[in-house]
Image (spheres, helix red, strand yellow):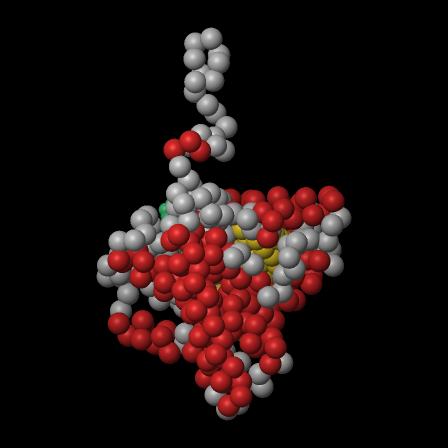
Amino acid sequence: MTTTSTAASTAALPPTALTERLYRTMSLIRHFETTAARLLASGELNGFLHLSIGQEAVAAGVCETLGEGDYITTTHRGHGHCIAKGAAVEAMLAEIFARAGGYCGGRSGSMHVADPAAGILGANAIVGAGIPIAVGGALAAQVLGDGRVAVAFFGDGAVAEGIFHESLNLAALWDLPVVFVCENNSYAEMTPTEVHLRSTTVSAYAAPHRIPGETVDGNDVFAVYDAARRAIARARDGDGPTLLECRTYRRRGHFEGDAQRYRTADDAAAWELRDPLRLLAERAAGDSRLSARLSSIDTECAQRVDEATRWARSQPEPGAASLTDHVYARPVSSDGAPR
Ligand SMILES: Cc1ncc(C[n+]2csc(CCOP(=O)(O)OP(=O)(O)O)c2C)c(N)n1
């Protein structure tokens, strides 16, 4: 059973507290990523940055339906998913500053953040590789009967990987409590989705596994939230996995520095009008109190990221003495003693 709903919702706004929470999550992600981009451009940060600017509704809408103990896995473009799942922007920034106070002690950079305490089983730069880890989390939850569910976030590029299909097969066969969330941002690196996939929807891949598949407007945070809520409830009730495709658009390059010759100015302009924060703010425009709240939430998020940046910058580097910490294979001398 595959369904598609792409029209932006025109219904009345959901309760104010939910609207404000969803907006706050999206705004925090947006400020985090625009700040990271600025720091990279100024030369203060090193390494690669893959931003999800324009895609925040997927992270916010899905993670709003999860509890603290639930699991997620994500990709090289995972800042938003981690923040929405509860990662602190302070330790995230310290991580990409390569400081000891970061989530992985400054070793992971932007692409491999993990925080098992918050259920973040890891970002992963190998395309598709997070998907079976979420299936493993779901299997553990089923065996332990602890009521947790797992969400695998991945891009359309991962759908061309064998591991995506193996993971769906196993999860469907064993009715595992996992939701597969394809954040289809219209490109895999420089390749448009329609150039690397024959199917016109990713959700169609649910049918052979006899699980529900749904395509939603990934820029409408309420549409994402509603679909995710149904899928998570199904997983938690023991009814097995769902494949959810959220159609969205990557507004920045594949990585910061990408020349982006593969997109047209018209496409970029059209999607700018459908920016998820903008869409939500426009829907709130008729309610002056709510509009004012959203603006102050925006200011609070900007301030929090500014403070987090100052804190992260002040953290020490890991230090040479910790070089072999967390390294499992160590060099040994000819007599077997550690060197
Ligand atoms: C197994 C594997 N193959 C190729 C790559 C190189 N690569 C990095 S990102 C990427 C595209 C990923 O596209 P998608 O899954 O749609 O995610 P997006 O970047 O759009 O978020 C590719 C091919 C990789 N990291 N891992």
Q: For residue 211, what is the image quadrant?
A: bottom right
In the picture shown, does residue 99 fall above or below 224? Answer: above
Q: For residue 61, what is the image quadrant?
A: bottom right
Number of numbered markers: 0
Residue 151: image location, x then y, percent: 58, 55
Q: For residue 144, what is the image quadrant?
A: top right
Q: Residue at x 69, y 63 (%)?
A: 233
Q: Does residue 171 appear left or right of residue 316 in this picture?
A: right
| Residue 323 visible | yes
Q: Which residue is farthest right?
A: 145
- Between 16 and 254, the one lying in front of the other is 16
- Between 319 and 133, the one lying in front of the other is 319
- Between 253 and 169, the one lying in front of the other is 253
Q: Residue at x 27, y 69 (%)?
A: 264
Q: Does residue 99 appear left or right of residue 42 in this picture?
A: right
Residue 29: image location, x then y, percent: 45, 64
Q: Residue at x 40, y 64 (%)?
A: 306
Residue 154: image location, x then y, percent: 48, 54
Q: Does residue 14 appear left or right of residue 186 in this picture?
A: right
In the picture shown, does residue 13 fall above or below 97? Answer: below
Residue 241: image location, x then y, percent: 64, 55
Quadrant in which the N terminus appears? bottom right
- Between 204 and 86, the one lying in front of the other is 86
Q: Residue at x 48, y 79 (%)?
A: 296
Q: Which residue is farthest top?
A: 335
Q: Does residue 68 appear left or right of residue 317 in this picture?
A: right
Quadrant in which the C terminus appears? top left
| Residue 135 visible | no
